[in-house]
Amino acid sequence: MGAVRRLVDADTGEALPYAPYAFSGEHIQVDKVRVEAITESKEFTPSQKYMVLWWIGVSPQGMAPLRATGADIAKKVGMTADAVGKINRKLLKRRILIERGRIGNYRLYRVSPYIAFHGTGIEQREAIRTCNPPDIPGFDNTTPSPWEAQ
C-alpha cells in the first residue's frame, strides 16, 4: 500500500472522501464505447475479441510494448502460435494493436492508446498523437469525443 493521502477542498478546507481502488494490482483506463463496439462487431471472431481483452489486460504502462513472442503469448492464452500471429496481424491492420518495436523478426505490440491506456490523461493524449485511431466496425469515429470538442 502506498502512502495515505488526504484530499482537501481548496475553497472550504474540508476533507474530501478518498479511497484507493480495490483492485488486486495495477489498473488501466479503457474507452468503453470502443471496447463495446469491438465486442459487439460481427467482423471479429470470438477468439479475436478475447485477444483484444487480453491485450488490454497485459499492455504495459505508457507506450511500452509487451515483450513476449507469439509462442509465449500462445502458451498463456491456450492457442497455437500460428493462431495468435494471425489474430495479431488482423488487430494490427485495424490499428487495435500498434507495433512498438522488434526483437529480430518478431514484432512487439501493445493495445492502441485510443482503446486502453495506463498513465495520466496528459500522457494518453500525447500517446494518441503518435498513432491513428483504430478502425472498428460499428464505431462512429466521426463524432468528436467530449475532450476532442473542447
Image: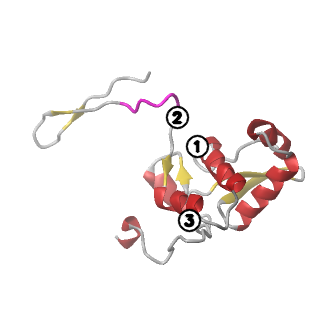
Q: Residue furthest right?
A: 105
Amino acid on which disc 3 is placed = Arg
Find out whether residue 127 is within the magenta segment.
no
Q: Main secondary structure of the magenta part?
A: loop
Q: Residue furthest bottom?
A: 142
Q: CA distance from mark 1 to mark 3?
A: 17 Å
Marks 2 and 3: in contact by CB < 8 Å? no
Amino acid on which disc 2 is placed = Glu
120 vs 40: above or below: above
| Magenta segment | 20-25
Foreground: disc 2 or disc 1: 2
8 vs 112: above or below: above
Disc 2 is placed on an element classified as: loop
Residue plotted at (50% across, 39% down):
27
Q: Earlier in the sequence, mark 2 or mark 1?
A: 2
Q: CA distance from mark 3 to mark 2?
A: 24 Å
Query: In this figure, which residue is indicated by the disc labeled 2?
Result: 26
* 32 relative position to 48: left or right: left
Amino acid on which disc 1 is placed = Gln
Q: Nearer the viewer, residue 45 or 59?
A: 45
132 vs 36: above or below: below
Q: Nearer the viewer, residue 70 or 122?
A: 70
Query: In this figure, which residue is indicated by the disc labeled 3?
Result: 129
Residue plotted at (80% across, 50% down):
84
Foreground: disc 3 or disc 2: 2
